[in-house]
């Protein structure tokens, strides 16, 4: 079960944070930002390898007793972090990968809106509703 979805900007500023009901928002916000260090390490390691192909899905960043933190980065250095319950063993890696692709498409749709100012928090109701539907399906 997904408990948190975070979209984080180029300069590590939060653009969007969804937290499941009954969860402590501050703790999950902290976990999402803690994953940024691991994202930076993985992106730096990928940048050192020869070739142009870069995998956007970074996989499991780290796991704690309660949560698993997964990461994804776009070509424009926007980071997406998904936090799941550690006890959830039914959610497979390819399902997480597909969720990130859908979230990336949703983010792309928001950025394409001419009224959206890049770097500003995402306040789109359509984005919010679609994220809720996406995480409810998993």
Image (cartoon, rainbow, N blue to C red):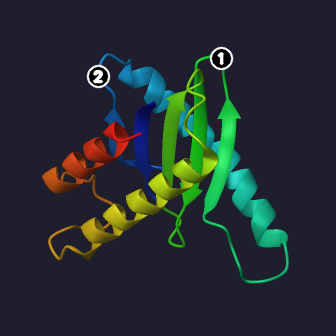
Of the 4 image quadrants, the one containing the N terminus is top left
Q: Is residue 127 above or below residue 108?
A: above
Asked which secondary structure carries label 2, the reply is loop
Q: Which image quadrant is residue 25 in?
A: top left
Q: Residue at x 14, y 71 (%)?
A: 115
Which sits earlier in the primary sequence, circle 2 or circle 1?
A: 2
Residue 11 seen in this snapshot: no
**Residue position marked by numbered label 2 in the rendering:** 21
- Residue 4 image offset from top left, x and y in percent: 42, 34
Asked which secondary structure carries label 1, the reply is loop
Q: CA distance from mark 2 to mark 1?
A: 20 Å
Q: As rendered, which of 133 and 106 lies closer to the eye?
A: 133
Q: Is residue 71 left or right of residue 21?
A: right
Q: As rendered, which of 34 and 71 lies closer to the eye?
A: 71
Q: Is residue 53 above or below residue 10?
A: below
Q: Is residue 57 left or right of residue 115?
A: right
Q: Is residue 22 left or right of residue 79?
A: left
Q: Residue furthest bottom?
A: 52
How many numbered marks are there? 2
- Residue 12 image offset from top left, x and y in percent: 49, 50
Of the 4 image quadrants, the one containing the C terminus is top left
Residue 24 seen in this snapshot: yes
Q: Is residue 125 left or right of residue 132?
A: left
Q: Residue at x 27, y 45 (%)?
A: 133
**Residue position marked by numbered label 1 in the rendering:** 65
Q: As rendered, which of 48 and 125 lies closer to the eye?
A: 125
Q: Residue at x 58, y 49 (%)?
A: 71
Circle number at residue 48: none
Mark 2 and mark 1 in contact? Answer it, CB < 8 Å.
Answer: no
Q: Is residue 127 above or below residue 47?
A: above
Label 1: how many Cα within 10 Å (few below 14, some 14–19, many 20+): few
- Residue 123 image offset from top left, x and y in percent: 19, 51
């Amino acid at each position: 079960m997904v408990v948190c979805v975070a979209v984080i900007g180029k300069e590590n500023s939060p653009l969007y944070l969804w937290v499941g009901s009954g969860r402590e928002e501050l703790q999950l916000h902290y976990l999402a930002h803690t994953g940024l260090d691991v994202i930076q390490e993985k992106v730096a390691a990928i940048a050192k390898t020869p070739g142009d192909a870069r995998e956007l899905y970074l996989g499991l960043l780290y796991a704690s007793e309660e949560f698993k933190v997964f990461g994804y980065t776009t070509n424009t250095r926007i980071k997406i972090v998904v936090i799941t319950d550690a006890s959830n063993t039914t959610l497979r890696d390819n399902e997480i990968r597909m969720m990130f692709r859908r979230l990336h498409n949703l983010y792309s749709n928001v950025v394409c809106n001419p009224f959206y100012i890049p770097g500003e928090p995402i306040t789109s109701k359509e984005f919010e509703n679609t994220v809720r539907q996406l995480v409810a399906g998993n």
